[in-house]
Amino acid sequence: MDYERYQKQIVLPKIGELGQKKICDSSVLIIGVGGIGCPTLVYLVSMGVGTIGIVDYDIVDISNLHRQFIYTNEDIGKYKVNCAKDFCLKRNNKTNINIYNLKLTNKITLELFINYDYILDCTDNIFSRHIINDACVLLNKKYFFSSAIGTSSQIGVFNSSITCACYRCLNNNKNINETCESSGVLGVTPGIVGNLLAMEVIKFILNYGEKLTNRLLTYDIYQGFYNVSVLKNKNCLICSKNAIINKNNYSKLDIYTPKCSIKYKYSTNDSNDSIYLNEFDTIDILFEKYCNNDNKLIFTCENKIKSKILVNKLRQFGRNNVWFLI
């Protein structure tokens, strides 16, 4: 432990040498080194986290530079993980940096996550968040969630205990997929949540301070900071007693992509004829397509999960003549 480097932290009564040792002995996996991942990474490296894994498969683009401050014009066209590692080692060469230049999928997540104490989601799409959340639940790891869009940002910690909600409890299996690419973002917005995310990780490492459990800390440029409560969903697909996603089927599921195939049997009200079709649309698109359709519909898909999500959503809307095959 480099006492001279960390002396300003060590003199803090709630940290001291023991607290700094906990930080130096910890391991963190950061998924996504974009607008949120950059400040999170910089502060965790600077504060002395001993091992940091970085997952990203993107390259640096000029449009990243207004908010992703660890990159420069010279980095354009280079892989982000390589640039991020070089930046971190110049800041603190005592930190062990592992880079994973790959797209995260449910086929590799469990094997990767098991090597790290804390899992940080700095991505910007719903499908990655479901992959990360479900893996954290199955491995009993805390899921540090963050998001930034437009002039708003959110941070929360899911799965911190058996009574706490997971991300699916909050999201309720919605497939709304707003991203900075599609909706825009003010440069400073992800910086705010990235700093808060780094602070939240340190709070858990030191077991100190009020934790963000069962609530989201939300910041908006117009409303300031406020909390949003998150309740555990007793019918959650991953963290409830009736969960249907488990360690045996997680890596085989095709529900973590917008191109999951759903088959449905369509029966007209005045005929016994049936038509079998394939659909590759998201659940939200399928819901919009069939929510006002009075015909009887029987849905199924290869892993029997996405079709169940769609039918449950349609029934909540009042469609009682839809079913899913078990």
Image (cartoon, rainbow, N blue to C red):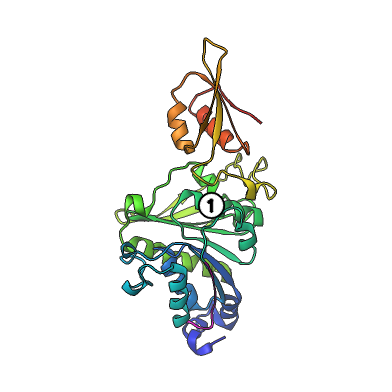
What's the amino acid at mark 1? Asn
Q: Nearer the viewer, residue 14 or 255?
A: 255
Q: Is residue 309 left or right of residue 246?
A: left
Q: In this view, does 288 lie to the left or right of 234?
A: left
> Which quarter of the picture shows residue 33?
bottom left
Badge 1 density bin: few <14, some 14–19, many ≥20, Cα 10 Å: many
Q: Is residue 65 placed above or below 275 in the rendered structure?
A: below
Q: Which residue lies furthest to the bottom in this view?
A: 4
Q: Name the residue under label 1.
A: 214
Q: Which corner quadrant holds the C terminus?
A: top right
Q: Which of 238 and 264 is in front in this view?
A: 264
Q: Is residue 322 magenta?
A: no
Q: In this view, does 273 lie to the left or right of 139?
A: left
User: Is residue 209 in view?
Assistant: no
Q: Residue furthest top?
A: 270
Q: Which of 144 and 177 is in front in this view?
A: 177
Which percent across, then down, holds residue 34? 41, 63
- Report the number of numbered marks: 1
Which percent across, then down, holds residue 29? 55, 66
Q: Is residue 297 placed above or below 152 in the rendered structure?
A: above
Which percent across, then down, holds residue 280? 49, 37
> Which quarter of the picture shows residue 161?
bottom right
Q: Is residue 317 placed above or below 89 in the rendered structure?
A: above
User: Is residue 122 in view?
Assistant: yes
Q: Which corner quadrant holds the N terminus?
A: bottom right
Q: What stretch is highlighted in magenta?
A: 92-100
Q: Nearer the viewer, residue 23 or 74?
A: 74
Mark 1 falls on what kind of element?
A: loop
Q: Residue furthest right?
A: 248
Q: Does the magenta stretch include residue 95?
A: yes
* Residue positioned 57% across, 42% down in the render: 233
